[in-house]
Image (cartoon, rainbow, N blue to C red):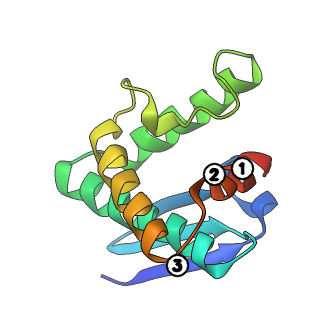
Amino acid sequence: MNIIIKVIPHEEQRYPTAGDWWFDGEDLHVRVSKLATRWRESCIAVHELIEALLCKRAGVLQADVDAFDKKFEVDRLLGNHEPEDEAGDNAAAPYYEQHQFASGIERLLAQQLKVDWLDYEEEIESL
């Protein structure tokens, strides 16, 4: 398996998200929105990498994750979710457990990289 991680302009994401992943055959692709520092981008990249691997191992289909995320974003525009809500934090998400684990690792990494969590979240929410 190859793992390809790229930082891209936010408007080039497949849908409104700071981090995205998908499999192309056995290759894993991760896309991270450009942020103020490489350390913040690294936190998102590691989150997406862990989430993707755990989903693959658990048999959670990428198509189900994508469908849930895209519907969640439409519902957000309709006012059904708060702006700061994350799709993976919704208990109905097909990848809820994988997202929660990845978020825990992301927080630990942010602490070690000296990323201020509140500033980091604020930047992500402003995308």
Per the model, the C-alpha gap separating discs 2 and 1 is 6 Å
Residue at x 39%, y 31% (from the top left corner): 93
Q: Which residue is mark 2?
A: 118
Per the model, the C-alpha gap separating discs 3 and 1 is 23 Å
Q: Residue reaching furthest bottom?
A: 2
Instruction: Please state the horizontal and vertical placement of residue 101, each as a whole percent of the image.
Output: 29, 51
Q: Quadrant of residue 102?
A: bottom left
> Left or right: 24 with respect to 94?
right
Q: Quadrant of residue 82?
A: top right
Position of 100 relative to 22 (above/below):
above
Task: Indicate the quadrant containing the N terminus: top left, top right, bottom left or bottom right.
Answer: bottom left
Q: Is residue 126 visible?
A: yes
Residue type beneath disc 3: Ile
Mark 3 secondary-structure assignment = strand
Position of 43 relative to 77 (above/below):
below
Mark 1 secondary-structure assignment = helix
Asked whether the residues under the numbered discs 3 and 2 touch, taking CB atoms below 8 Å apart as contact, a structural biologist would say no
Q: Which residue is mark 3?
A: 5
Q: Residue reaching furthest left?
A: 58
Residue at x 43%, y 59% (from the top left corner): 107
Q: Which residue is mark 1?
A: 122
Instruction: Please state the horizontal and vertical placement of residue 34, each as a whole percent of the image.
Output: 73, 70
Instruction: Please state the horizontal and vertical placement of residue 108, each as a whole percent of the image.
Output: 38, 64
